[in-house]
Image (cartoon, rainbow, N blue to C red):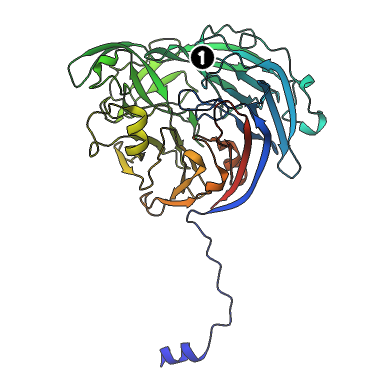
Amino acid sequence: MVLAASVLQPQLQPQPTVAQTGPSVTFLADTVLDQSALYFVSYDGLVNNNAFQDALVTYNGYQYAAWYTSSRNAVIARRALSGGGWEKAVLPHRLSVNDSHNVISIGISPQDGTLHVAMDTHNTRLYYTKSVAGLATQPGSHQWSPSVFGTVQRTLGGAELGNMTYPQFVVTPEGALQFSYRTGGSGNGVNELAEYTGGSWRKLGGWSSATGNYTGPNGVVSTTRNMYLHGLTYDRRGRLHAAFTWREGNTRVLCSPGGLSNHDTGYVYSDDRGRTWRNGSGTVVGTTGGTRISVNSPGLIAERLDPNHGLMNQEGQGADSAGTPHVVISYVPGRFTQCVSNYAQQRTQYGRTFHVVRNANGTWTKREVPVPPGSTQRTKLVFDRNDNAYLVMPRGRIVSASKAEGWKDWTLVFDRPSMNAFGEVSVDTSRVAVDGVLSFQYQQRSTGTTPSPIRVVDVRLG
């Protein structure tokens, strides 16, 4: 009787709407920054789009982009997210060498509204300029032109950093702008930090060590290395997360000279804005400007891997709303070979991407993503407001996994071969946090040194 009544008398009250919490991607736009951007391939990459740069940043209703045009000039552009085209400011600096490491990175200081530009460095002194105060905090009050930027310097606003590589900016929860960079070189380098407060920069010092002994699987000992960061990420609670891989200076630790001497995925964090570093168990393992983290520091390894699998450096990381660290890595699994002897060929053919997440008990879980990258290039990681994860892979493909399924259900959700994107893309993680839109900058494939269009795609997540 109850069943019959429910069938014969339909529910007259409207049903509540259930919010969609699973991952999704909705294409919004694909806009041109420059029809004729500088193009050349070195180290398998392009100088305008590398995962280890901040080429696309959002702040206070505006998005900012950076690239080198066909004249080799550095360009900084902006657009209002409310609508309108890109405004461009061509800086007087020209790229000094055809090296894809010599990227442009931009950062914004919330304290005084200055926009900072670091560029054109690979084991050399950087080129640096900053804007007038208030440019980013009061964008409508400033006409966009090269005149809003100061003279290009060879120091970080008066702070002498020496020869350096990999300039990147990060903003602390209090609004201080920090600058991450490496001194020394590949296989023998140190990660360092500087900080911008009160209108000036000061060096905080180095925090990773190049020294210590590492013994390869073949018994060969390496005594120098560098820590390659997957990123520096502040979570919502103010903790600074840093995942990394080591690269050994002595390549004889490898089974073949055609490989890459990266090994292991490590993890540390800081609760005092990068001054003190702790391993996953909370033990202090280093201090910036003091005792540095070394390959022999305890409790660093999140995922162990020997140096014979072509492990990529400087890939991706992020932290979800609960402050849980996630890392994306890629390498050639042992089912294909235990000895990578031709890095470019075997990485492209056999390389696989993996999601690594820290569990509540301090252990780490690694899962293979069932969409091969098909590239030597890097993948970046972002989250939507429901903590669903999105991997932005080479050529701008996006795969996603849901928090509800424990990030196990990786699925290809965005793929537009018509973009003709080359390799890595530059991801604007700051915009995702603001309005749920993922923007990424990509450059279209060309040949030789023929310039090609550089563009920005916008997709809505969740």
The residue sitting at 42% across, 9% down in the picture is: 290
The residue sitting at 59% across, 48% down in the picture is: 459
- Residue 407 in percent (x, y) is at 38, 48
Image quadrant in which the N terminus is located: bottom left
Residue sitting nearer the eye, 99 or 356: 99
Q: Please name the amino acid that badge 1 sits on.
A: His
- Residue 47 in percent (x, y) is at 55, 25
- Residue 423 in percent (x, y) is at 49, 35
Horizontal placement of 318 versus 26: left or right? Answer: left
Whether residue 32 is situated above or below residue 66 in the rendered picture: below
The residue sitting at 51% across, 37% down in the picture is: 236
How many circles with numbers are drawn on the protein?
Answer: 1
Identify the residue under disc 1.
Answer: 122
Which image quadrant is residue 169 in? top right
Residue sitting nearer the eye, 329 or 321: 329
- Residue 38 in percent (x, y) is at 62, 26
Residue sitting nearer the eye, 278 or 303: 303
Whether residue 398 is situated above or below residue 428 in the rendered picture: below
Horizontal placement of 68 versus 142: left or right? Answer: left
Q: Secondary structure at mark 1?
A: loop
Which image quadrant is residue 434 in? top right
Which image quadrant is residue 334 in? top left
Residue sitting nearer the eye, 81 or 455: 455
Horizontal placement of 4 versus 124: left or right? Answer: left
Within-10-Å neighbours for mark 1: few <14, some 14–19, many 20+: many
